[in-house]
Amino acid sequence: MEPSTRLASIQLNNATISFDDRFTLSEIDWTIEPHQHWVITGANGSGKSALAAALAGVGKIEAGTVQGLPERVGLVSFEVQAELIAEELKKDDADIMDVVSLGTPVSEMIFEHCEDAELAYELVEKFGLTTLLDRAFRKLSTGETRKVMLIRALANKPDLLILDEPFDGLDVDTLAMLQAHLASIIESVPMVMVLNRFDEMPDFITHVAYLDKDRPDPAQENKKQGNRARREGGRLAFTVDRQDEAAFNELYQLLHLKTTDLSVPEADPAHQLPALDPNQPLVKLKQATIKYGDTVIVDSLDWTIERGQHWQLSGPNGSGKTCVLSLITGDHPQCYTNDIFVFGFQRGNGESIWQIKQFIGYVSTALQWEYRVSTSCRNVIISGFFDSIGVYTKSTDNQQKIADQWLDLLGMKTRADQPFNKLSYGDQRLLLIARAMVKHPPLLILDEPCLGLDDMNRQLVLALIEKICEGKETTVLYVNHHTEDRIKEIDNHLTLDKNH
Amino acid sequence: MANYFNTLPLREQLAQLAKCRFMYSSEFADGVDALKGKKMVVIGCGAQGLNQGLNLRDSGLDVSYALRPEAIAQKRQSWKNASENGFVVGTYEELIPTADIVLNLTPDKQHTAVVNAVMPLMKEGACLSYSHGFNIVEEGMQVRDDLTVIMVAPKCPGSEVRAEYVRGFGVPTLIAVHEANDPKGEGLALAKAYAVGTGGHKAGVLMSSFIAEVKSDLMGEQTILCGMLQTGSILCFDKMIEEGIEPGYASKLIQYGWENITEALKYGGVTNMLDRLSNPAKIKAFDLAEELKDIMRPLYNKHQDDIMSGHFSRTMMEDWANDDANLLKWRADTAETNFEKTPASDVEISEQEFFDNGILMVAMVKAGVELAFETMTAAGIIAESAYYESLHETPLIANTIARKKLYEMNATISDTAEYGCYLYNHACVPLLADFMKGIKSDVIGKGLDLDDNGVDNARLIDVNDALRAHPVEAVGAVLRGHMADMKKIV
């Protein structure tokens, strides 16, 4: 038989595929070239297994096209495994009135439709199933069943091998053996694997596809309740060539953030902020005005931010968004000529800016540009306790521990001691968000947190912000000039117009 | 007015010169309390005036600006600086009588006129503050007996004073109390609170005297800090052109070279700077520096002698009276040097290459730092002061050259420093003419051309011992240790 090099590429063009009328993958664009080996990964519930199964012809194409699917596809997955077991049990039921069924023996399962018996024998031996060949398939353990399925698929000499979480439940030796065998056949068969853990990814994998789970629209969700509407899968958000090391690392982090059970680390109990009067607003600007010479940037703005009231501030470039923020943070010199109440202080009465800043976590592109000290990733997070750029105060063991928990959450644990300025732009942004949140401030200001980031890093930042919004004690003030980057928890909007 | 220093007996002169102590963080536990609720009025709204004022206000203090009526009427830059930043701005007559502390942050040459104008307006028992002691020490300004006179001198350009504060840090700061004017004994408390208000306490504060500040500051800025870097830039550039080095490369090697090599100085003193070289290059740099020190020692002595005797300040004040004729001519001459006129190319030079191809520059920095330190300490200035005014500030000045060459350096430093820099340069360039004849591109521009890096063991040990045994290294190690404690984990 010719090796699979004769295969043309597999192409999904704007394909919408439904599965049992209950689950849909929409608008998938994906091309698998011969000799590529892919891993599909993504958020939980995004439809990774469904996408893999679609390559085996599972599902109904509702729109778009799917071309070049090979005839002989080996598919190993929990779903197929479960189906086989179910079938075996059914046979058992059917025979219950007659004699006790032994079920299909393992040897039949393996050799019945086998293309390469010699290989099958070899694998049976390698997988240590020799003594189990006469046993009934349904009597096997889950791990053993999985091995049988792998042997079936491999010995069937498929033109495309689809392995959905193939390494789950395998012991260390078997895992190594399987990895080695897969590595030995990469020239003859393209592979697509579903994997949730990057560290299991074999070296021969050339590409990674990431399925993103869009946040469900709450209104839609409500409607769905009761009428069991079909569930939407994620979109195929990115494909990454493994050669692209930077993109590959970002994908690793994104997956980590999307799938980790870790939540935002606690505040430092030894670093308590002064208590705020719960009856006072966090911020109250009265007739706030900023002007340079005769140019008025902000004109008579009244704005009150109550505790727990998330806000989105938008407006075109030059409408003074950042100016308004800097009145709140105390970074604008004209905060002394305006009527500003922040965190219990009427500005200009002998308070210092550090008394104001302690209540605020702040992230912006400008901050990132200004953060030019050569310091470690861990210290960047620790600096959030002191509102400084760089660390000039001795930090406590607990503060260091909290910083490490944040690094863990970001999937950057191993990079704690690396210099901040050597990180990618997106990683720097993530660290600065962690820095802003580390003290659990009453007000978190995110000034265009996705600005200058590519799509993957945008996803990363939004994933982190979402994690943060799960907590309740921080009021979020989110600034951007796009309306599409919305955070669902935010329902107060202030739009500034260009005055000048 | 007589030169104040010269009116003191020798033992008092020596006692004042010897004042310099690195203060402990615990000495700033009271924060800005001594200035809380007091009215601070700044005179002058240039880089120091504006940025110190912004810091003090952000520290919760009451700051306003007194400007001359014409600056207000004509809406000059100083008026714009102050009013656009939301400060109260008024005339001397309006604001000085209300002030508890008047911050004189005008250039040296305006001090006499400014102080004479504000003194009669100041209320009984108020405080007058300087950021440089020239007016008191060299011009002998006599301040009213009931007024407290202090100095708070951030050892950085005004823009840095602000930038470091905003980062949550500060810049090293020198404070002093003029003992002849401390009627209530509150001078030190006010100076400490002021240093906290600008953020200086986070970076380290030196307790010094007006005299030690002036005499060491003048010496440092004229010789190693500005003079040596200017002379070195011009000589090294011209030599490289003579040796056929590509002009854009030569320009870049010098413009950014000072900054790169003195960064090593900042971290580990002269020893570390030379340790960045290969062994043969280190021995070469050491020998060149020894030669340079022998040639330049009389010049350093002359600068220090003229500063101590008051000759320097007298001649400079004569130039002030002559509409800055010398200063302006020298400034124009500098703009016409080949180095200044040749733009740096965009060729890539690695950090190590600045050392390898700039052996002569390393030697010049070593010679200048050590000579300035030796000359200052021989004249009675305490080692701590001498360290700050030689080695410590060299990287700060080198940064200004990296930004925009000599123009930027001279624009950033005070007129007094600029004047001293030109004096030094005019004497030093001809002084080094013979020495420069023997210089080839192996020590400036190309790096040593060697088959291997072998050296004689005994010779290397001698050189390493000599480097480490210099007294600037001993005091430097202690002071850098303090600074590291302050900065901790920057």
Image (cartoon, rainbow, N blue to C red):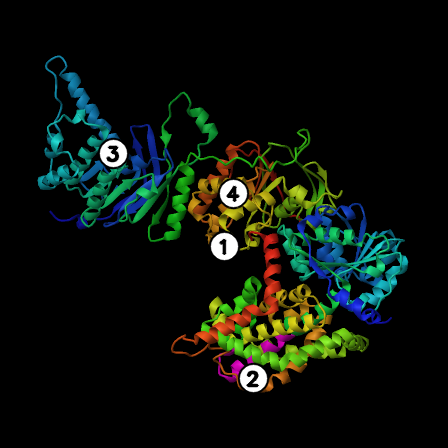
Is residue A13 on the magenta stretch? no
Three-letter code, disc 1: Asn
Badge 4 and badge 3 both on one subunit: yes
Which mark's residue is nearer the viewer, 1 or 3?
1
Callout 2: SS = helix
The disc, 4 or 3, on the residue closer to the chain's N-terminal end is: 3
Which mark's residue is nearer the viewer, 1 or 4?
4
Q: Considering only vertical position in the picture, is A56 above or below B122? A: above
Q: Mark 2, chain letter?
A: B
Badge 1 and badge 3 both on one subunit: yes
Residues at marks 2 and 4 touching, judged by CB atoms closer than 8 Å? no
Callout 3: SS = loop
Callout 1: SS = helix
Q: Mark 3, chain letter?
A: A
At which x and y percent is residue A180? 21, 45
Badge 3 and badge 2 both on one subunit: no
3D distance between C-alphas at marks 2 and 4: 54 Å
Callout 4: SS = helix
Three-letter code, disc 3: Ser
At which x and y percent is residue B421? 68, 75
Q: Which residue is mark 3?
A: A77
Q: Which residue is mark 1?
A: A421
Three-letter code, disc 2: Met
The disc, 1 or 3, on the residue closer to the chain's N-terminal end is: 3
Write the start and end of the magenta stretch as one range: B226-248
At which x and y percent is residue B223? 66, 74
The local crowd at label 1, few if under 14, some if 14 to 19, many if 20 or more residues have their Cα within 10 Å, is some
Three-letter code, disc 4: Gln
Q: Considering only vertical position in the picture, is B357 above or below B179? A: below
Residue A400 image label: 4
